[in-house]
Amino acid sequence: MFEAQIKPILEEYCGDCHLDGAKKGGLKLDGWESVEALKKDHQTWTHVLEQLEHRIMPPSKEPKPKDDELNKLISLKVIYSRYIHS
Ligand code: HEC
């Protein structure tokens, strides 16, 4: 699920500033390679989803995820929070 649904979106829209050694704002998304990793780091992940949901990230000059991509991530939040709290 992570590889197929989450990673491509993070790489495309967040990578320049938060991947491969870049860590703007102290946020580094490297090392998230599975849903298990997200589960361990669920505070950061929840924070990331909140930024997306409220359209805070990516910064306004940058390309934004399309609505359907965003909705996909946001729906994962629901699935995901069930998963970590179960
Ligand atoms: C053009 C560079 C750039 C891109 C692209 C970008 N960010 Fe950021 N991000 C920043 C900068 C700069 C900060 C720190 C300053 C700030 O908070 O505005 C930041 C901070 C953050 C924070 C921490 C905010 C806080 O206050 O704790 C999160 C979470 C975040 N980004 C998530 C994302 C996600 C998710 C994406 C992809 C959808 C993304 N960012 C894309 C530059 C970027």
Image (spheres, helix red, strand yellow):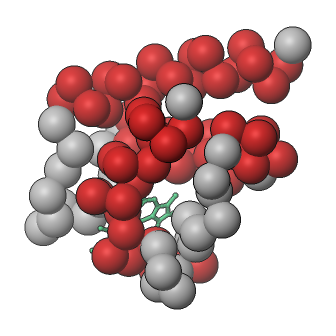
Q: Quadrant of residue 57?
A: bottom left
**For this rendering, which residue is in front, 73 or 51?**
73
Give ligand 1's quarter of the image. bottom left
Q: Is residue 37 visible?
A: yes
Place of residue 9 in the rendered image (x, y in percent of width and height, measured from the top left): 34, 47
**For this rendering, which residue is in front, 25 or 40?**
40
Residue displayed at 46% across by 18% down: 75
If the image is split into quadrants, where does the C terminus sit? Answer: top right
In this rendering, the answer to whether 65 lies above or below 59 is: above
If the image is split into quadrants, where does the N terminus sit? Answer: top right
Q: Is residue 75 left or right of residue 72?
A: right
Residue displayed at 19% across by 29% down: 67
In this rendering, the answer to whether 7 lies above or below 81 is: below
Residue displayed at 31% across by 32% down: 70
In this rendering, the answer to whether 51 lies above or below 4 is: below
Q: Is residue 42 visible?
A: no
In this rendering, the answer to whether 25 lies above or below 2 is: below
Q: Is residue 80 left or right of residue 50?
A: right
Residue displayed at 73% across by 14% down: 82
Q: Is residue 68 left or right of residue 35?
A: left
Place of residue 54 in the rendered image (x, y in percent of width and height, measured from the top left): 37, 39
Place of residue 44 in the rendered image (x, y in percent of width and height, measured from the top left): 67, 53
Q: Specify the farthest residue to the right.
A: 86
